[in-house]
Amino acid sequence: MKILIIGDGAREHALVWKLAQSSKVTELFVAPGNAGTAQLAENLPIAPTNIKNLMKVIQRNQIELVVVGPEASLAAGIVDRCREAGVLVFGPTKAAARIESSKAFAKELMENHGIPCASGKVFFTYFGARRYLLNQTPPIVVKTDGLAAGKGVVVARTLNEALVALYELMVKERFGQQAIVDEYLQGREISLMAFTDGSIARPIAPACDYKRVFDEDKGLNTGGMGSYSSPELLNQTMIKKLTETIIIPAVYAIGEEARWPYQGVLYAGLMMTTDGPKVLEFNARFGDPETQVQIPRLKTDLADIMMAVTNRTLRQIKIKWSDEACVGVVMASEGYPGKPKVGREVTGLNDVDKDIIVFHAGTEMRGGKTLTVGGRVLTVVATGKTLREARDKVYDNIRRIRFDGCHYRKDIALRAIDI
């Protein structure tokens, strides 16, 4: 089977890494890929949103399955085009992907279908939102309606911070004109995802990610600075309950709205509050950096799962996960999450232990050297019998990899060790 993976991040490298282990897979292509995927597949220099050229290479290379990584590709309608061309594709349609591409749509869907979430309001004008904010008590959450690569959410600790965020989102049109103002939820944040063919859902091992750029959750929101997954994060009873009360109702609701079964991965960002779990956000694809710590725990052939999702036969697949813990830490460029400084040489990639996995994101090979080309550069991943063991392995190895201006969080999974 020939497979094309769309995307260039560490998430896509993790998917390529797993699919390359399948006996069902004969050829792997990645568009556009990175220095890491180039070691396992053929990189194609095509942007994830260039639907016209993607369809050309799909037909030219007789691709049998397309796997969509980034949300921008879904929002651009790549799944719809593949379906029209009769090509199997793993991912939801453009209409279904609105669960992520429009937070206003997601808010309305959750409220209409009784899915627990933060209370809030959607605003179409800056002055209406500003009047509402002036009557709220911080902390307050301000969100853009559209896609923002994980950086369109501001948790404002003061009213002034909230007003500044609102101005940037709605007046400067940084990410879009619509905005959502949500209540601030407290608790433990967990990412729960599931494979779904539109009829049933099979949960993916849950993970916890770290969105703030600096230790102790300080600084700006990012696309994610690290993650961990372990059997202790959620017990099987709770996973089953969350799947039945949140994931499956959302799958059915989105399917009704989109008039087509939701197929692919549905991601629910949850806050485990004292009033019970509540949805912070839905995403229409694998998480990043969560995928980098979930996929190493997957024991079942990923190609089999993806084919079952696209053929709507997921009920016939039993998905198994390892009992090991997994920790991943993101190495980022100087300047990230603002404008990153790129073109720095990455060294030490061959100095890590054999059981360490390094998933590439913002990298490319040039003149025999690995250079940085983006904000999040690498995710260094380790598994272990315990969370402590996995964490110790990561931080023992991450210091061996170097590039000028590199920064990473030192507290990934630290507090979870004692939970």
Image (spheres, grey):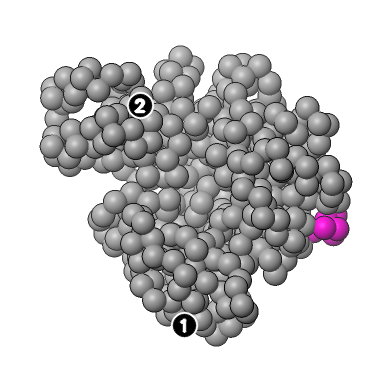
Say if the magenta span includes residue 93: no
Residue to which mark 1 is pinned? 400
Q: State whether residue 330 is above or below residue 32.
A: below
Foreground residue, 414 or 15?
Answer: 15
Q: Residue at x 70, y 38 (%)?
A: 52
* Crowdedness near tag 1: few (<14), some (14–19) or many (≥20) residues, C-alpha within 10 Å: some
Q: State whether residue 22 is above or below residue 351.
A: above
Q: Main secondary structure of the magenta part?
A: loop
Q: Residue at x 34, y 54 (%)?
A: 338
Numbered disc 1: secondary structure = loop
- N-terminal-most mark, 2 or 1: 2
- The stretch in magenta equals 22-27
The mark found on residue 177 in the picture is 2
Residue 22, image quadrant:
bottom right
Q: State whether residue 63 is above or below residue 371.
A: above
Viewer can see residue 229 = yes
Q: Measured from the top left, where is residue 326 in percent x and y?
A: 53, 63
Quote the CA–CA distance across marks 2 and 1. Answer: 44 Å
Q: How many marks?
A: 2
Q: Measured from the top left, where is residue 132 in percent x and y?
A: 19, 20
The amino acid beneath tag 1 is Arg
Q: Residue at x 29, y 62 (%)?
A: 215
Relative side of 397 to 176, left or right: right
